[in-house]
Amino acid sequence: MVRKLSLQEMQDIYEKQMKTDFPPAEIKPFSAIRSMCERGEYTGLGMLTDEGRLLAYAFFVLCRPDAQAVLLDYFAVDKDRRGEGVGTCMLQEIKKIYSDIPVLLESEDPDHACNEADVKKRERRLSFYHRNNALDTGVRARVYGVDYVVLQLSLPGQEPEEDCARKVLGELYHTMFSPEQLATKVEIDGKPASCV
Protein backbone atom coordinates (compact mmCIF):
# COMPACT_ATOMS: atom_id res chain seq x y z
CA MET A 1 0.00 0.00 0.00
CA VAL A 2 1.31 3.47 -0.93
CA ARG A 3 -0.01 6.46 0.98
CA LYS A 4 0.83 10.03 1.86
CA LEU A 5 3.12 10.40 4.87
CA SER A 6 2.44 12.74 7.75
CA LEU A 7 5.05 15.33 8.67
CA GLN A 8 5.88 13.30 11.80
CA GLU A 9 6.37 10.14 9.71
CA MET A 10 8.64 12.08 7.35
CA GLN A 11 10.68 13.31 10.31
CA ASP A 12 10.97 9.76 11.67
CA ILE A 13 12.21 8.55 8.26
CA TYR A 14 14.62 11.48 8.10
CA GLU A 15 16.08 10.73 11.53
CA LYS A 16 16.15 6.92 11.31
CA GLN A 17 16.70 6.06 7.66
CA MET A 18 17.70 8.92 5.40
CA LYS A 19 21.01 9.40 7.13
CA THR A 20 22.02 5.87 6.12
CA ASP A 21 20.31 5.94 2.69
CA PHE A 22 22.00 9.13 1.42
CA PRO A 23 25.42 10.77 1.74
CA PRO A 24 25.39 13.54 4.38
CA ALA A 25 26.13 16.23 1.76
CA GLU A 26 22.90 15.34 -0.08
CA ILE A 27 20.60 15.67 2.92
CA LYS A 28 19.01 19.06 3.50
CA PRO A 29 18.18 20.08 7.09
CA PHE A 30 14.80 18.82 8.23
CA SER A 31 13.89 22.40 9.12
CA ALA A 32 13.94 23.15 5.35
CA ILE A 33 11.68 20.17 4.64
CA ARG A 34 9.32 21.21 7.43
CA SER A 35 9.12 24.79 6.12
CA MET A 36 8.35 23.62 2.58
CA CYS A 37 5.71 21.19 3.92
CA GLU A 38 4.07 23.99 5.89
CA ARG A 39 3.94 26.12 2.73
CA GLY A 40 2.43 23.23 0.74
CA GLU A 41 5.58 22.85 -1.37
CA TYR A 42 6.73 19.41 -0.17
CA THR A 43 5.21 16.01 0.49
CA GLY A 44 6.12 12.38 1.04
CA LEU A 45 4.77 8.99 0.04
CA GLY A 46 5.47 5.69 1.73
CA MET A 47 4.99 2.08 0.66
CA LEU A 48 4.05 0.04 3.70
CA THR A 49 3.27 -3.59 4.47
CA ASP A 50 -0.13 -4.47 5.95
CA GLU A 51 1.61 -4.46 9.33
CA GLY A 52 2.84 -0.90 8.78
CA ARG A 53 6.52 -1.64 8.04
CA LEU A 54 8.04 0.89 5.64
CA LEU A 55 9.31 -0.73 2.43
CA ALA A 56 10.11 2.41 0.43
CA TYR A 57 9.68 6.15 0.62
CA ALA A 58 9.74 9.11 -1.73
CA PHE A 59 9.87 12.81 -0.87
CA PHE A 60 8.81 15.40 -3.45
CA VAL A 61 9.09 19.12 -4.08
CA LEU A 62 5.79 20.49 -5.41
CA CYS A 63 5.75 23.18 -8.05
CA ARG A 64 3.32 25.92 -7.04
CA PRO A 65 0.74 27.12 -7.70
CA ASP A 66 -1.46 24.04 -7.69
CA ALA A 67 1.33 21.43 -7.86
CA GLN A 68 1.59 21.48 -11.66
CA ALA A 69 4.75 19.32 -11.44
CA VAL A 70 6.80 17.46 -8.85
CA LEU A 71 10.49 16.73 -8.39
CA LEU A 72 11.44 13.44 -6.79
CA ASP A 73 13.79 14.78 -4.11
CA TYR A 74 14.58 11.57 -2.17
CA PHE A 75 13.75 7.97 -3.05
CA ALA A 76 14.92 4.87 -1.20
CA VAL A 77 13.97 1.26 -0.62
CA ASP A 78 14.49 -0.55 2.69
CA LYS A 79 18.00 -2.03 2.48
CA ASP A 80 16.71 -5.51 3.32
CA ARG A 81 14.21 -5.42 0.43
CA ARG A 82 16.42 -4.12 -2.39
CA GLY A 83 16.49 -6.26 -5.51
CA GLU A 84 12.98 -7.62 -4.88
CA GLY A 85 11.07 -5.25 -7.17
CA VAL A 86 9.93 -2.91 -4.38
CA GLY A 87 11.52 0.12 -6.06
CA THR A 88 9.87 -0.70 -9.39
CA CYS A 89 6.49 -1.14 -7.69
CA MET A 90 6.90 2.18 -5.86
CA LEU A 91 7.77 4.03 -9.09
CA GLN A 92 4.71 2.55 -10.79
CA GLU A 93 2.52 3.83 -7.95
CA ILE A 94 4.14 7.26 -8.14
CA LYS A 95 3.34 7.40 -11.87
CA LYS A 96 -0.31 6.54 -11.12
CA ILE A 97 -0.62 9.10 -8.31
CA TYR A 98 0.91 11.88 -10.42
CA SER A 99 -0.40 10.69 -13.80
CA ASP A 100 -1.61 14.13 -14.89
CA ILE A 101 1.55 16.18 -14.15
CA PRO A 102 5.27 15.87 -14.93
CA VAL A 103 7.36 13.95 -12.38
CA LEU A 104 10.98 15.02 -12.75
CA LEU A 105 13.96 13.40 -11.11
CA GLU A 106 17.69 13.96 -11.03
CA SER A 107 20.16 11.11 -11.44
CA GLU A 108 23.89 11.67 -11.07
CA ASP A 109 25.52 12.01 -14.49
CA PRO A 110 27.94 9.12 -15.28
CA ASP A 111 29.94 11.49 -17.50
CA HIS A 112 31.03 13.36 -14.36
CA ALA A 113 31.87 10.39 -12.13
CA CYS A 114 35.13 10.48 -10.16
CA ASN A 115 36.18 6.85 -10.81
CA GLU A 116 35.11 3.63 -12.56
CA ALA A 117 33.17 2.32 -9.55
CA ASP A 118 31.23 5.60 -9.43
CA VAL A 119 30.53 5.38 -13.18
CA LYS A 120 29.06 1.88 -12.72
CA LYS A 121 26.93 2.96 -9.75
CA ARG A 122 25.55 5.95 -11.66
CA GLU A 123 24.92 3.88 -14.80
CA ARG A 124 23.13 1.21 -12.73
CA ARG A 125 20.86 3.87 -11.20
CA LEU A 126 20.10 5.40 -14.62
CA SER A 127 19.39 1.94 -16.02
CA PHE A 128 16.90 1.29 -13.19
CA TYR A 129 15.07 4.52 -13.96
CA HIS A 130 15.09 3.84 -17.71
CA ARG A 131 13.62 0.35 -17.15
CA ASN A 132 10.79 2.11 -15.31
CA ASN A 133 9.96 4.50 -18.18
CA ALA A 134 11.95 7.45 -16.90
CA LEU A 135 12.98 9.25 -20.07
CA ASP A 136 15.90 11.63 -20.53
CA THR A 137 14.57 15.16 -20.93
CA GLY A 138 17.80 16.41 -22.50
CA VAL A 139 18.20 18.84 -19.58
CA ARG A 140 21.29 18.78 -17.37
CA ALA A 141 21.61 20.34 -13.93
CA ARG A 142 24.41 21.08 -11.52
CA VAL A 143 23.50 21.50 -7.87
CA TYR A 144 26.25 22.37 -5.39
CA GLY A 145 28.86 20.88 -7.74
CA VAL A 146 27.01 17.62 -8.47
CA ASP A 147 26.05 17.05 -12.10
CA TYR A 148 22.69 15.47 -12.89
CA VAL A 149 20.81 14.01 -15.84
CA VAL A 150 17.20 15.21 -15.55
CA LEU A 151 14.63 12.50 -16.25
CA GLN A 152 10.85 12.45 -16.40
CA LEU A 153 8.76 9.52 -15.22
CA SER A 154 6.44 8.80 -18.10
CA LEU A 155 3.43 6.69 -18.83
CA PRO A 156 3.50 4.69 -22.09
CA GLY A 157 3.15 7.07 -25.03
CA GLN A 158 4.25 10.16 -23.08
CA GLU A 159 7.40 11.91 -24.26
CA PRO A 160 9.05 14.65 -22.20
CA GLU A 161 9.48 18.03 -23.85
CA GLU A 162 12.90 19.55 -23.20
CA ASP A 163 11.73 23.18 -23.04
CA CYS A 164 8.88 22.27 -20.70
CA ALA A 165 11.18 20.20 -18.49
CA ARG A 166 13.71 23.06 -18.30
CA LYS A 167 10.99 25.57 -17.36
CA VAL A 168 9.42 23.27 -14.76
CA LEU A 169 12.81 22.39 -13.25
CA GLY A 170 13.57 26.11 -12.95
CA GLU A 171 10.28 26.65 -11.11
CA LEU A 172 10.97 23.73 -8.80
CA TYR A 173 14.47 24.99 -8.02
CA HIS A 174 13.01 28.43 -7.24
CA THR A 175 10.88 26.67 -4.60
CA MET A 176 13.89 24.86 -3.13
CA PHE A 177 16.68 27.45 -3.16
CA SER A 178 17.27 31.07 -2.18
CA PRO A 179 18.03 33.70 -4.86
CA GLU A 180 21.70 33.64 -3.85
CA GLN A 181 21.88 29.84 -4.16
CA LEU A 182 20.14 29.97 -7.55
CA ALA A 183 22.71 32.50 -8.78
CA THR A 184 25.82 30.75 -7.46
CA LYS A 185 25.20 27.07 -6.63
CA VAL A 186 22.50 25.82 -9.03
CA GLU A 187 22.76 25.59 -12.82
CA ILE A 188 20.43 24.35 -15.54
CA ASP A 189 22.13 23.54 -18.85
CA GLY A 190 25.22 25.49 -17.84
CA LYS A 191 23.41 28.69 -16.83
CA PRO A 192 22.67 29.92 -13.31
CA ALA A 193 19.18 28.73 -12.36
CA SER A 194 18.33 32.33 -11.44
CA CYS A 195 18.36 33.06 -15.20
CA VAL A 196 16.04 30.19 -16.20
Image (tube, helix red, strand yellow):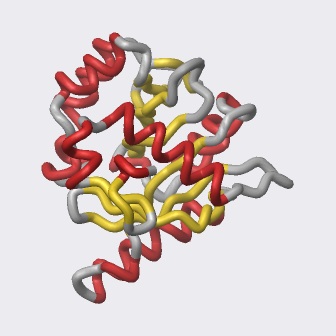
Residue 167: percent from left, percent from top: 56, 47
Query: On the rendered structure, is 176 left or right of 55?
Result: left
Q: Position of residue 53 (x, y in %)?
A: 40, 26
Q: Answer left or right for 87 relative to 174.
A: right
Q: Quadrant of residue 110?
A: bottom left
**Nearer the observer, 56 or 147:** 147
Q: Quick one: 189 or 122, which is closer to the camera?
A: 189
Q: Residue furthest right?
A: 157
The answer to which quarter of the image holds residue 120 is bottom left
Which quadrant, please, contains the N terminus? Answer: top right
Front in this rendered view, residue 69 or 129? 69
Residue at the image position 48 percent from the left and 28 percent from the top: 62
What residue is rendered at 43% in x and 32% in y?
61
Q: Identify whether 148 is placed above or below 110.
A: above
Q: In x, y percent, where is residue 105?
A: 49, 50
Extreme residue toward the bottom, this view:
116
Seen in the picture, residue 77 relative to 11 is either above or below; the reply is below
Farthest front residue in view = 195
Tell me where residue 89 sits by quadrant: top right
